[in-house]
Image: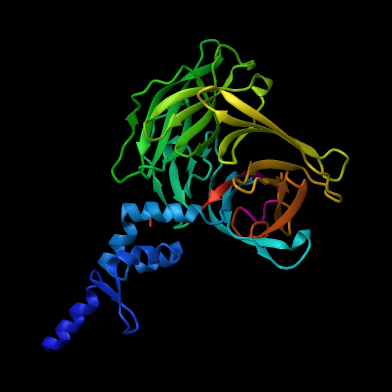
Amino acid sequence: MERQKSKLAKNNNISDDVRTSGEGSITLDLIPEILKDLPVKTLARFLCVSKPWSSIIRNRDFVKSYLIKSTNHPQGLIFTFKSKRHGKHVFFSSSSQRQDGGGESSLSCAASYHMKCHSQPYTAITPSVHGLICYGPPSKLMVYNPSTRRSIALPNVDAHRLRMYHYLGYDPIGGDYKMLCMSRGMHARRGRGLAHKIQVLTLVNGSSWRMIEDSPPPHSPESPHICIDGVLYYGGYLDTSTRLLRKDHVVMSFDVRSEKFDMIKVPTERATRFTRMTRYNGKLALMFTGYGGFGCGYSGYIELWVLEDAARHQWSNKNFVLPRLASRDTLFQVFCAIDGSGEFVLAPDTLHPPTFYVMYYDPNNNSMRRVDIEGIADKKLQFWDDDSDRRTISIFPGHVENLLFL
């Protein structure tokens, strides 16, 4: 009996070591390094192995180190579509691509369906921030992790029928996710109102909205935004006295760790024209694009302004003319750049069966490659597959494995 009790205690004491095939042991110090190489789904199952293993996987430092390792792997895409008939936003993701053979059309990857929500006015959809996305109206704002397929509801913000703006940021030093929220008031002459009631929320259990201590330069916030290396960038306007927006467009920066604001002047050549923000070679880039049908003589172009020095408001300019693709008769949008490869992601404005696909434009050799995304256009889903008018709303890079909300 004593021998059985001793054996049982040894098997349950995984905090001491993990026995292998009788040829030694793996110390507890090595377990986190081994677990870092496993996918999130496997780690979710390992939570039930024992309390020590659960403690390791949920440990804040392990979650942070796991995320760092994930960002060094090939990253996928997050897709948002709008079902116009039913008024729904539908979310998908894709990860790795597979090569089935030679030729342009040989690349494909599988998509995963995640969720849908109402596409009502003032519904926010943030870019993927180290694997997390935020969506929903101010009263029902959610932060969702596609890796774990779990989400958390943020505390309600009383909008008082004012326009609300939400921006999700990440501090890579402290490993904290923070949500920046601000209202935009109405101007007396029906112009654009200034940002006020600026609050921040740290995504930890029991946290609540708190007023920001730093006062930003007076500005009116806008929607394009992105978080790069702990700095949250979003568009803004300085002149709020009129609806006629001219050369008053700026980029606001918010340091997620210090919670300090700053203002970056935008090149006057395109001060009011950039339509998207993206990450290009590790830096913030403002992107303005023009495009047409790829079956005609006009193809399209990408105009890029890359932030070289925020303190000095210095930008560099890059312009690319997209190649014309024969037999393409649909309209495309340029949604983002892939950091590292330097490729740009283009996709059709509308979804047409049987297969949704994206085009990757490589400016280095002025070439296009097609990747079929299987499991989107043909997905059998209520309020989705019976809608003939489905629009591509956003495509964000940076889809990585994340353990948050596991």
Compare residues 309 and 382 and report the one nearer the observer: 309
> Measured along the vertical axis of the image, is residue 352 above or below residue 282?
below
Magenta span has 113?
A: no
Which residue is located at x 76 percent, y 36 percent? 301
Magenta span has 392?
A: yes
> Measured along the vertical axis of the image, is residue 123 above or below residue 249?
below
* Magenta span: 384-394
- State which quarter of the image contains the N terminus: bottom left
Is residue 160 visible in the rendered structure shown here? Answer: no
View extreme (left): residue: 2
Which residue is located at x 86 percent, y 45 percent? 295
Report x, y in % for residue 353.
73, 57
Say whether residue 60 is left or right of residue 284. Answer: left
Locate residue 257: give its quadrant: top left
Report x, y in % for residue 183.
45, 25
Count every numbered label the image shows and give the total: 0
Report x, y in % for residue 154.
38, 41
Say whether residue 229 is left or right of residue 63. Answer: right
Report x, y in % for residue 276.
62, 34
View extreme (front): residue: 24
Q: How is the image coloured?
A: rainbow
- State which quarter of the image contains the C terminus: bottom left
Is residue 154 visible in the rendered structure shown here? Answer: yes
Compare residues 21 and 212 and report the one nearer the observer: 21
Say whether residue 81 is left or right of residue 331. Answer: left
